[in-house]
Image (cartoon, helix red, strand yellow):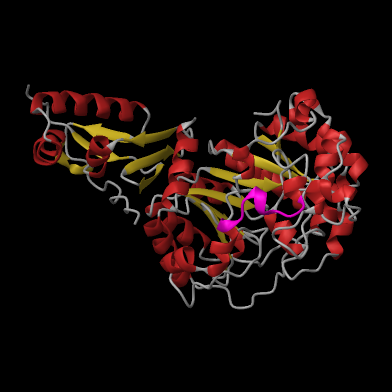
Amino acid sequence: MSLLAEMNQKALTLGIPISVHLDITYRCNERCVHCYLDHDDHGEMTTAEIEDILNQLSAAGVFFLTLSGGEVLMRRDFFEIVEHARRLLFNVKLKTNGVMIREPEARRIRELGVEQVQISVYSHRPEVHDAITKLPGSLKRTVEAIRFLKSQGLKVVIANVLMASNLFDNTGVMALAKELGVSYTLDPTITPKMDGDTSILALRIPGSELKQVFRSQELVGNVEEFCAPPPPPGEDIMDGFPCSAGHTACYITPYGDVFPCVQFPLPSGNLRQQKFIDIWRTSSQLKEVRSIRARDLPTCSTCAHVGTCTRCPGLAYMEGNMRGPSTADCEKSFQRTGVPSANMLLGARVGSNGSLIQIQGASCT
Amino acid sequence: MVIAEKYIARSSAIAARLIGGEMMIMSAVDSTFFTLNEVATVIWQSADGRTALSDIVTSKICPQFEVDPDQAGRDAEQFVSDLSQHGILMVSEQPILNSPASPPEAQ
């Protein structure tokens, strides 16, 4: 077991939220067609409120802090927030579109000791990328930002969300990542909007194309192993829980709402009304999430994929039942292995949601 | 054994958190991950740039862990050498001013 895995296990045992994803704003300078957020400002937290929350997170034992949005640099106090976070010795990762990052911003990010910057790139072709972001010139600005960050010696990851309109561009984006000397992650995840609107799910890539993605050696490494039929689940699988959401991780909105995960919008408390540690320890919603084991899932516990599926409880929740299947993951498991899920065999409609996989490119550094 | 006067300070390019008595440290430069045992954690927390390493050993390590001063001194030297090679600790023969604040402790 790696040191990191050991610490995660320790955090789980001690009930420590080792990772928090904090969106500091939902405002954005892009209008991506697949975005799940409402970009209007409905009263986001002030600098003082965010700094107080960071103090609370530090005291609660949070180590990994992801600052995201919206576009994080839309906040004028962005660097003040990062500075405060770094003073508290968080491991800080940023998610940004990079459009507002020039040489001075890149230098400041490096000086503050940010560990990683993740930047969304949808295509290597400006006409495709800019059509998705609805911001002319955005690819050019984003690629320039990556170069500025790299020149500072920062670790940069390109996140390539795959959807119908950029379906065949992942190879080009991967080549771009290689040329820039940065890591590459493919993400065919299109999630419903936070308010439950599912209209953007029409942008997802068709299942048959997903099958093709899963058979790309460049993306998944050993295809035979990756696409192998699932082995029978052991008792440890049935006693396991699906992911870290609510167990060692949670999500905080710009308005102070606490959810188990950014993709699991189950209201569990608000930091304008309660202290973080009280929400983390006493929220009935988080307790319910923590109580669920694989054997408690009515359909999924009978599924051949129960031990290998990337079932997202958040997507299941957005489909109406956090103990139910996440149909996007049913489809993913099916497209990957050719073995239908229990939910598919029950005749449920499959494919109403996006998928939930993050594939690290094997050939990029 | 006489410990040479050394002053140690934490690098600002790290992330750290005390979890269950163990200090987790990650370098922002190369993402190397470390965990420190209780003794090493005390040394690391005391690395304020102003307290000599010998004082840290005699005033904090020896009384708290009931260890032999010579052995503790040698172990502390080795520990400081290891962490400084990874850029986690800065070492100087003079006090290091403006060193980063102490890491907050988790509940």
Question: Would residue B13 appear left or right of A64 to someone viewing this image?
Answer: left
Q: Relative to A81, is A234 above or below?
A: above
Q: Quadrant of residue A87?
A: bottom left
Residue at 85 percent of width and 40 percent of height:
A334
Residue at (64%, 55%) from the top-left corner?
A100
Q: Does the magenta run of residues contain A295?
A: yes
Establish if A172 lies above or below A132: above
Front-most of A260 and A255?
Answer: A260
Where's residue A279, x and y in %? 48, 68
Seen from the viewer's position, the closer of residues A277 and B78 is: A277
- Work out which quarter of the rendered image holds the C terminus of chain A and state it: top right
Q: Quadrant of residue A318?
A: bottom right
The magenta stretch spans which residues?
A: A290-299
As drawn, A217 above or below A288: above
Spot occupied by residue A138 in the image (x, y as percentages of width and height): 76, 52
Q: Is residue A354 visible?
A: no
Residue positioned 9% across, 36% down in the render: B58
Spot occupied by residue B67 in the image (x, y as percentages of width and height): 12, 31
A355 part of magenta stretch? no
